[in-house]
Image (cartoon, rainbow, N blue to C red):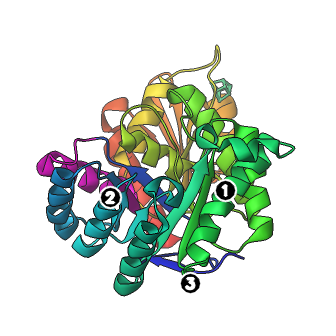
Amino acid sequence: MSRIVKIGKISIGGGNPIAIQSMTNTDTRDTKATLEQINALYRAGCDLVRVSIPDFESLDAFAAIVKCSPVPLIADIHYDYRLAIGAIEKGASKVRINPGNIGQSWKVREIVSAAKDYGIPIRVGANSGSIKESFKAYETKAIALAESALEETHILESLGFYDIVISAKSSSVIETIEANKYISSKVDYPLHIGVTEAGIFETAVVKSSVGIGTLLLEGIGDTIRVSIAGDPLTEVRIAKKLLKSLNLREGVEVIACPTCARTEIDVESLAYDVENWLEGLDKNLTVAVMGCVVNGIGEGKDADIGIAGTASGAVIFTKGEIVKRVKKDILKRDFLKLVKEYLRKN
Ligand code: SF4
């Protein structure tokens, strides 16, 4: 089991819940927009948010942002050690650096010293795109990636710093899995896992589910990021569903039939509606949205509560038993009433 590392109010590793991480894609200098996005990510279920600090103007904005953030913020720094130290002093709960690109060792030492003073962890790691030439002699790219991340780790260890989170990311699912397995067999630092540059929606969802899911099933990974080109809110929604599917997070799961010639209701749009109606409910609840009563009630009997389409509206059922027949216009009202009742009794 990985060791425990505290990132602000969130503890990761050591069997703590898997934390969901995302990253703002606003201009950090735009304090208002960045804070709005952080708040939206928090409301969507994000535990940790990473913010890039590419320059000193962004650092000034970060100081204001961090004061109002509802979640611990991770400062993402490249090259300039002064930005890392500034972010630590201004309230970052973790900094993400690559000691290898910070430059002279005294600069890394300064960052480590500030992190020690403020009691915050440092995330180090490697991406498959930035593996050094000297590592390419390893037998596989995955091992080269893992060893690159471990080299960064050893730099911090050599400075007496052990409050470390490691990441090793590749846009290849197989490389990501193998590299993280390798690292977890060598050290017990918590791992931040994800398939990087995973792509646009469908591709990213598939790659992240396989990559992150495989590792989590093997007990590897303490924080996750589902990387999707676009709105980070989508990353968080997918991450929640991913964790929920592995019973690693409480919440609502809406299952839906694939539809066929018997379908008597718009299953897809109703399933989206049900997700929206129940958004924010952090209780375990499985809801089935089925196209017909012929097979729908039987096939959905493992769900806690379900809706099946009929010619004149729908039926609401719990554990395979019809509880109520409703017209479409009052479906939402009656369904939510029955959900409330179900949760009260169970
Ligand atoms: S539940 Fe009914 S509508 Fe949905 S796939 Fe099965 S038979 Fe078809």
Mark 2 burial class by Cα count in 10 Å: few <14, some 14-19, many 20+: many
Residue 74 position by quadrant: bottom left
Q: Which residue, given by chain and number where applicable, does mark 1 sit on?
A: 246
Closest to the observer, 116 or 42: 116
Q: Is residue 50 at all visible to an observer of this figure?
A: yes
- Could you tell me which residue is drawn at 25 percent across and 67 percent down? 86
Q: Is residue 323 at all visible to an observer of this figure?
A: no
Residue 146 position by quadrant: bottom right
Q: Which span of residues is magenta-colored?
A: 26-50
Q: Which residue, given by chain and number where applicable, does mark 2 sit on?
A: 42
The x and y percentages for residue 265 are 49, 23
* Label 1 to label 3: alpha-carbon separation: 37 Å
Q: Is residue 282 left or right of residue 221?
A: left
Name the N-terminal-most of marks 1 and 3.
3
Whether label 3 lies within 8 Å of ligand 1 gets the answer no
Name the N-terminal-most of marks 2 and 3.
2
* Label 2 to label 3: alpha-carbon separation: 34 Å
- Could you tell me which residue is drawn at 56 percent across and 27 percent down? 202
The amino acid marked with disc number 2 is: Tyr
* Label 2 to label 1: alpha-carbon separation: 21 Å
| Above or below 26: residue 84 | below
The x and y percentages for residue 278 are 39, 50
The amino acid marked with disc number 3 is: Gly
- Please, what secondary structure does the residue beneath circle 3 have? loop
Residue 242: in magenta span: no
Ligand 1 image-quadrant field: top right
Residue 37: in magenta span: yes
- Could you tell me which residue is drawn at 69 percent across and 44 percent down? 211
- Please, what secondary structure does the residue beneath circle 1 have? loop
Q: Which residue, given by chain and number where applicable, does mark 3 sit on?
A: 160
